[in-house]
Image (tube, rainbow, N blue to C red):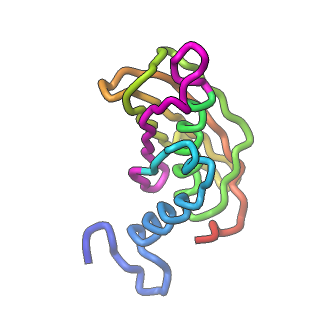
Amino acid sequence: MTADNHGTGTGEPSHGERMQAVQTFFKRDRFAHHSAIELVEVAAGFARARMTLQPLHLNGLDIAHGGAIFTLADFAFAAASNSHGTVAVAINATISIVKAVSQGTLWAEAREVSRSRKVGTYAVEVKNEAGDLIALFQGTVYRKSEALPL
């Protein structure tokens, strides 16, 4: 057993097994796949995703479309908010784009700010390869009682 895979002895999956199952679950996200977004890391209340900019991500000004940046941030938000193994659905999300970008890889890191039985709030920073802040995203989820279908 590794430090991340403690086995509960109760038939419940370990933390490491649950995180792997969440990562596998999000491979089913067809829109993220279509948008060339990859979930790189997931942990309880945290997720990291990346998107290498391609021509399909650019708007008429040849800069990253706001919708592409939002999609990357939203995907990381979804993974982080569902990482606890129960279904979480977005009820609010906002984004502020602070810097234009037209090439390279964008990284989104989602972190849990607060979580109760029914509501969770998350902050997502989108940065480029140089670590420059591109966008700030804030999202709120409604946490359902049902288990995530892993």
Residue closest to the eye, 102 or 133: 102
From the viewer's perspective, is 5 left or right of 38?
left
Image quadrant where residue 130 sits:
top left
Residue 88 position within the rendered picture, expressed as x and y whole percent measured from the top left? 66, 54
Q: Residue at the spot x=43%, y=41% of the render?
A: 50
Q: Is residue 20 visible?
A: yes
Residue closest to the eye, 12 or 75: 75
Would you say residue 115 sits in the magenta stretch? no
Would you say residue 59 sits in the magenta stretch? yes
Residue 32 position within the rendered picture, expressed as x and y whole percent measured from the top left? 57, 47
Residue 17 vs 135, above or below: the answer is below
> Of all residues shown, which one is farthest toward the left?
2
Q: Residue at the spot x=47%, y=33% of the render?
A: 54
Magenta span = 40-66
Image quadrant where residue 128 sits:
top left
Residue closest to the eye, 127 or 61: 61
Residue 28 position within the rendered picture, expressed as x and y whole percent measured from the top left? 58, 61
Residue closest to the eye, 47 or 56: 56
Q: Residue at the spot x=63%, y=29% of the render?
A: 67
Residue 144 vs 13, above or below: the answer is above
- Counting every numbered tag in the picture gives 0
In the rendered image, which quarter contains the C terminus? bottom right
Residue 145 vs 60, above or below: the answer is below
Residue 119 position within the rendered picture, expressed as x and y whole percent measured from the top left? 68, 47
Q: Can residue 125 be seen in this view?
A: no
In the rendered image, which quarter contains the N terminus? bottom left
